[in-house]
Image (cartoon, grey):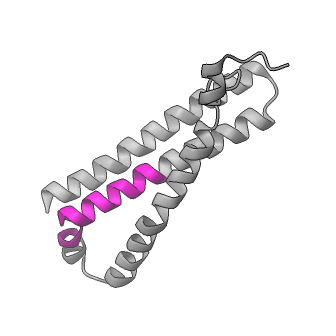
Amino acid sequence: MNMRTPLGKVRGLGSAKEGTDHFWRQRLTAVASIPLTIFFVVFLAHYAGAPHAELIAALSNPFVAVTVGLMVVAGLVHMKIGMQVIIEDYVHGEGAKIALLMLNTFFTIAVGGLCLFAVLKIAFAG
């Protein structure tokens, strides 16, 4: 006998009220990272050994700056979700789990902020 409400059946939400949200967000960021990473690797290969001024000028291009920013965001969201799943699955102490989940979030925000600051600084200074 299924005790879920019709709305719960349609939304597919379990007791944690998240359903498959993490699964889809993880897959979405993985798929988004493919072209972004390819662009970044090609960009790095093209500018390997280039003078500093030439690299700064290339990173000042709005298309390049936005693409690098999107790669940073997609990679960090993907990393945060992956680490969250690992922590939830393998850390059994409730206090340690909460502390690690908070550190995971703070670390992601700090790294994201620093990376985006660097990209924006280069984009607007060049």
Q: Residue at x 49, y 66 (%)?
A: 34
Q: Nearer the viewer, residue 85 or 126?
A: 85
Q: How many marks?
A: 0
Magenta stretch: helix, strand or loop mostly: helix
Quarter of the image where one finds residue 92: top right
Image coordinates of residue 52 in percent, x first then y, are 24, 74
Q: Nearer the viewer, residue 69 or 2?
A: 2
Quarter of the image where one finds residue 47: bottom left
> Relative to residue 20, is residue 8 depicted above or below?
above
Which residue, as the protein is rendered here, is positioned at the far right? Answer: 1
Q: Nearer the viewer, residue 119 or 89?
A: 89
Is residue 64 inside the magenta stretch?
yes
Is residue 73 inside the magenta stretch?
yes
Image coordinates of residue 14 in percent, x first then y, are 70, 25
Q: Is residue 4 left or right of residue 74?
A: right
Image coordinates of residue 54 in percent, x first then y, are 20, 77
Image coordinates of residue 105 in percent, x first then y, are 53, 33
Q: Is residue 124 left or right of residue 106?
A: left
Question: Where is the N terminus found, in terms of image quarters?
Answer: top right
Instruction: Confirm whether residue 1 shows in the render.
Output: yes
Question: Where is the C terminus found, in terms of image quarters?
Answer: bottom left
Q: Residue at x 50, y 52 (%)?
A: 29
Magenta region, residue range: 56-74
